[in-house]
Amino acid sequence: MKKRVVLTFPKESIEEPITYHLIRDYELMVNILSAKVSPNEEGKMVVEISGQKEMLHNGIDYLKKLGVTSEALAQDVIWDEQRCIHCTACIPLCPSHALSVDRSKMLVSFNSDRCIVCGLCLKACPYHAIEIRF
Amino acid sequence: MPKTIAEINERIKKGDAVVVTAEEIIDLVDKKGVAQVTRDVDVVTTATFGPMCSSGFYFNFGHSRPRIRAQKIWLNNIPAYGGLAAVDAYLGATELSEDDPTNTIYPGAFKYGGAHVIEDLVAGKDVRLKAISYGTDCYPKKEIETIINLNDMNEAVLFNPRNAYQNYNVGVNLSDKVIYTYMGVLQPRMGNANYSSAGQLSPLLNDPLYLTIGIGTRIFLGGGIGYVVWQGTQHNPCALRGENKVPKRGAGTLAVMGDLKQMSPNWLKGVSMTGYGVSMAVGIGIPIPILNEEICQFTAVRDEAIYAPVVDYSSTYPQREPDVLAEVNYSQLKKGSIVVNGKQIPTGGLSSYAKAREIAEILKEWIRKGDFLLTEKVASLPSVDSGISLKALKEKAL
C-alpha cells in the first residue's frame, strides 16, 4: 500500500527522528518529496509512504501520538479549471509533471496524484487558478 | 482575379463566404497551392489572448446632484485618471491601489488592480465609486462615494494604446537567483524560458506588412466588437525581419478600442504577475481578407518560420543592452523545450494558444453567420518603408 501525505508537526516534535522510526519500527519505505523543518516553527513534510497495510496504519497512529497530523496530499492543491486560461506559464516550473500540457490541444491539466505540493506553481500563475490549502 | 472587400462582404451577407482560421489555412495552402486557395478562401481569422499591459477603459459616470467635477476618482479603491472633463475618467489596467504593498514584501502578489476592476465590471459586478474635487460655483460637491456598475455608466470604452504585439522576446534568467518579471517567474541559470505570442495564429504575424490590418479594421475585442484605431505605442515596423518578411523581434503594435459593455470576463482577465504588477489578458481576433496571393501566402505562415529572440531578463533587459542569446521558433517553444548555449530549457507560455484558437473559431462563426462584416482600412499603419526607429530616452543634465 502506498500513500502520499502532508505531515504537519508542532514545534515540540521537531526533534523527533520520525522518518527513522517509520522505517525501522514499521518497515515502511519513506520517500521525502519536500520538507520544511526549522527550529521553533511548525514543520511540514510531504512524503510518500509505502509498506504493508497494517504497518502503514500503525505508523500513522504513531505519528498521531506525537501530535503530527497527516492529510492526504490531493486535497491540498486546488487547480481551478474555470480560472485557468491554459497559458502554460506553470508548466516548466512543475518538478513532478503534475501540471502538464496536451501539446496538440495546448490545454493544461492537473494530476493531483503526481503533485508534491512544492508551491512553485502558485507564484507562476497570473490568474489565481492554483491554490494550496494547508 | 483579385477580390475586393466589398465582394467578400456580399458573400458574407449571403452566407456564402469561405472562412478558415490562420491554422487551417496552412494545410490548405500545402495541399492545394496558394493560387487555388486564394480563389477558394475569402477570410482568414487570426487571434491572440495574452497579457497586454497597455490597456484600460475610459468612462463617464453621470452627474450627481449637486454636481461634482471629480478631480480624483477611484473604482474599488483603484485610482482612475480624472484630468478630463467633469465625470470622465480613464482607468488603466496596471493601476494599483495607493495602499498596495507592491514589492515591499518581495515578491509582491499584486492581487487586485485596474484590470481586475475591468474584469469585475464586465462580469456585471457592482464596484465602489469614490471621487473628490475642489468645489466650484458650477460644481459645488466635493466628495462622493457610491456603488456603480457598467450599466449605470453613460459610456464605457476599452481603449488600449498598445496591444497585439507583432512578436516578442523569450525571457530567460542567467543569474543565480529567481527573478520576478513581466515575463513571469524566471528560474536561475536558465531554468525556464517564457514566451508570449500566439505565433502562427497571431494577427500581425499573419499580415506582417500591414497590407490589410490598418486604421478602421473591425475586430473581435474582449468578446465584443472593436476597431483598430491607430498604430500602437512603440510600433516599430523597421525591426529585423526574415526573408519571409516576418519580424524576428518585437515590431508592430496596435491601438484598439471598443464598447466595454459588449465585452465578457472570458476575454478580459486580470493578471497578477508575482513581483511585477498587474496586467490584463485581452482577447483579440482580427479577420484578414484574402484579396490576393501575397496576402494568402502571408497567412499561411507556420510556427517553424516565426523566430523570436531569447533575452536575459536578469541583466541584459533591465540594463537595456541589445544582446540576444539565441533565436528560436514557435514550433520549438510550443513543443515545450528550446536549446540555448547547449542547454535544454523547458518553456512556458504567457499567451494562451488554446484561447487564441477559441477566438479564431468564434470570429469565423460570426463571419460565416453574416453577423460580422469586414471593413476597408481608412489609412495604413506605418510599415517597413516608414523609416521609424524606436527612440530610447536620453537623460539630460538639468
Image: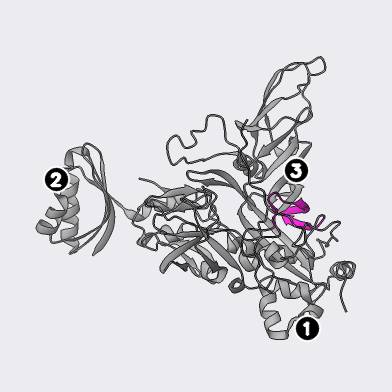
Q: Nearer the viewer, residue A61 or B220?
A: B220
On the same chain, marks 2 and 3? The answer is: no
Residue ID at (60%, 58%): B168
Answer with the quarter of the image where residue B364 lies. bottom right
Report x, y in % for residue B74. Answer: 64, 30
Residue B386 is marked as: none
On screen, residue B84 above or below B254: above
Question: Chain letter of disc 2?
Answer: A
Disc 3 vs disc 1: which is toward the camera?
1
Chain bearing mark 3: B
Is residue B225 rendered magenta in the image?
yes
In the image, what residue occupies the spot 25% across and 38% down?
A: A41
Looking at the rendering, the stretch of residues picked out in magenta corresponds to B216-236
Q: Mark 2 vs mark 1: tell me if same chain.
A: no
Question: CB of mark 3 within 8 Å of CB of mark 1?
Answer: no
Picture coordinates of residue B112, whole percent (x, y):
55, 39
Q: Does residue B30 sit above or below B248 in this rendering?
A: below
Of residue A90 and residue B206, the one placed in the foreground of this image is B206
Quadrant location of the C terminus of chain A in the rendered image: top left
**Left or right, residue A105 beside residue B216:** left
Q: What residue sits right under mark 3 in the picture?
A: B157
Q: Amino acid at mark 2?
A: Glu
The circle drawn on residue A16 is 2
Disc 3 and disc 1: Cα gap in Å? 41 Å
Q: Residue furthest top?
A: B137
Crowding near the residue tagged with mark 1, few <14, some 14–19, many ≥20 C-alpha atoms within 10 Å: few
